[in-house]
Image (tube, rainbow, N blue to C red):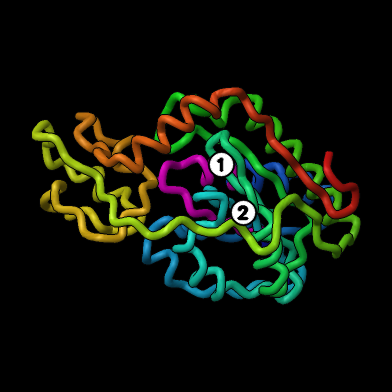
Amino acid sequence: MTPSLHTVFFSPTGSSRKMAQETARALAQELAQNMALARGNDWNWTFPEGRAAAHTLGPEDVLVFAFPVYAGRIPQVLMEPLARLAGHGARAILLAVYGNRHYDDALLEAVDLFGANGFSVPAAGAFVAEHSMTAKVGAGRPDAEDMAAIADFARNAARIIASGESANVAVPGNRPYKALPPAADIRPQTLDSCTQCGLCASVCPMRVIDADNAAQVAQGCLRCCACVKICPEQAKYFDNPQVDKIVAMLESNCRERREPEVFFAAAGKM
């Protein structure tokens, strides 16, 4: 059976999806010079129905996994679906997507999890997207330079895969991983200008916004801000001191452009 190249992404605001698919495109193009590889599935874990599935890969398969960094870690909502992802020797290319502050221990956590699930991880990278909480941090990213860097990262990863390298990449981070902040029940607010178009409910990764009454939001919000970004009336917003404090810190300290960081099993950091 011809091995397959799959993608998995959790992408409430679209950046992780965009980066995963560009990585897969460039990876497939480069690998086609050395091996037969079918383009497999795009597994979208953004919504509950996608996260409910289990997936098993074979030893010659390749998987691209892209995820947003939340509080320096992998989003906790991905832990259950990750536990149902079996590698059986498949290669995984990992992308941690963060909002220009830092990715902290998220990339290391991902390498560890995929190794425990039977994958080898020959390449991993940390890439910047516009911060979900404020467009003033990482504004407009990923931009053309970022997308070119992702394509170059994918081509280098493909060469390592083609070489037969099976070692796991070394990436920055600490064990134990960064402690998660205490859970907080913070929900988006809705202005009277809301037209009940339903867009916010359609993009909510936790399905906590009522499809018939957007002002009704159940417990479980991740504060991914997908609803805020998509609202054509700018009627969704957060009104919370904790959120305000985080936004103020980001806008004061994290505006200087950070560049992608990429790591390869065969050659270390490039």
The answer to whether residue 2 is seen in the rendering is: no
The spot of residue 180 in percent (x, y) is: 50, 58
Image quarter for residue 89? bottom right
In this rendering, does residue 164 appear at all? yes
Which residues fall within the magenta stretch? 5-20
- On the image, the x and y values in percent for residue 176 come to 66, 64
Residue type at mark 2? Ala
Contact, CB < 8 Å: mark 2 with mark 1? yes
- Which numbered tag is attached to residue 106? 2
Reading the image, the residue beneath label 1 is 98
Q: How many numbered callouts?
A: 2
Residue 201 or 235: which is nearer the viewer?
235
Q: Residues within 10 Å of mark 1 (few under 14, many from 20)?
A: many
Q: Is residue 238 left or right of residue 128?
A: left
The Cα atoms of the two marked residues, 2 and 1, are separated by 10 Å
Q: Residues within 10 Å of mark 2 (few under 14, many from 20)?
A: many
Query: What kind of element bears circle 2?
Result: helix
Q: Residue at x 25, y 37 (%)?
A: 237
Q: Name the image quarter holding the N terminus.
A: bottom right
